[in-house]
Image (tube, rainbow, N blue to C red):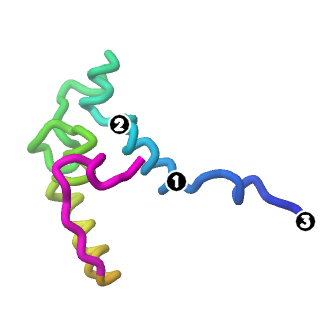
């Protein structure tokens, strides 16, 4: 039986969850901590209201929140957003 590489490799969603669990999503704030200047501003590129941290981007950004709510409504799922992404993901 042949096994393709795609079956053995993790999906994009799994990679994002893994990175989120370890705080390795390259947000503006994370890049600044690493000494990488990603832009002049650390503000979220979606809402321009808060610094773009992993927790803001995945849990608190009003633009992303609308997308989460729409997805949850579509799949009839209730989700309570935690303060931190790590509270949502068990590593």
The residues bearing labels 2 and 1 have C-alpha atoms spaced at a distance of: 16 Å
* C-alpha distance separating marks 3 and 1: 25 Å
> Which mark is on residue 12?
1
Judged from the image, the secondary structure of the residue bearing numbered disc 1 is helix
Could you say which quadrant of the image residue 2 lies in?
Answer: bottom right
Name the element at disc 2.
Answer: loop
Q: Is residue 1 above or below residue 35?
A: below
Mark 2 or 1: in front is 2
- Horizontal placement of 22 versus 1: left or right? left
Q: CA distance from mark 2 to mark 3?
A: 38 Å
Q: Where does residue 14 sit, x and y in percent of width and height?
A: 50, 54
17, above or below 35, in the image: below
Work out whether mark 2 precedes mark 1 in sequence or the reverse, and give the earlier one.
Answer: 1
Which label's residue is closer to the chain start, 2 or 3? Answer: 3
Residue extending farthest to the left is 49
Q: Main secondary structure of the magenta part?
A: loop
In the rendered image, residue 75, in percent from the top left (x then y), is placed at 34, 81
Q: Which residues are magenta?
A: 77-91
């Amino acid at each position: 039986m042949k096994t393709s590489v795609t079956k053995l490799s993790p999906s994009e969603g799994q990679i994002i969850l893994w990175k989120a669990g370890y705080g390795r999503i390259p947000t503006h704030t994370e890049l600044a901590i690493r000494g990488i200047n990603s832009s002049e501003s650390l503000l979220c590129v979606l809402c321009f209201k808060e610094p773009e941290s992993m927790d803001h981007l995945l849990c608190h950004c009003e633009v992303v929140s609308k997308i989460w709510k729409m997805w949850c409504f579509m799949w009839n799922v209730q989700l309570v957003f935690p303060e931190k992404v790590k509270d949502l993901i068990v590593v």
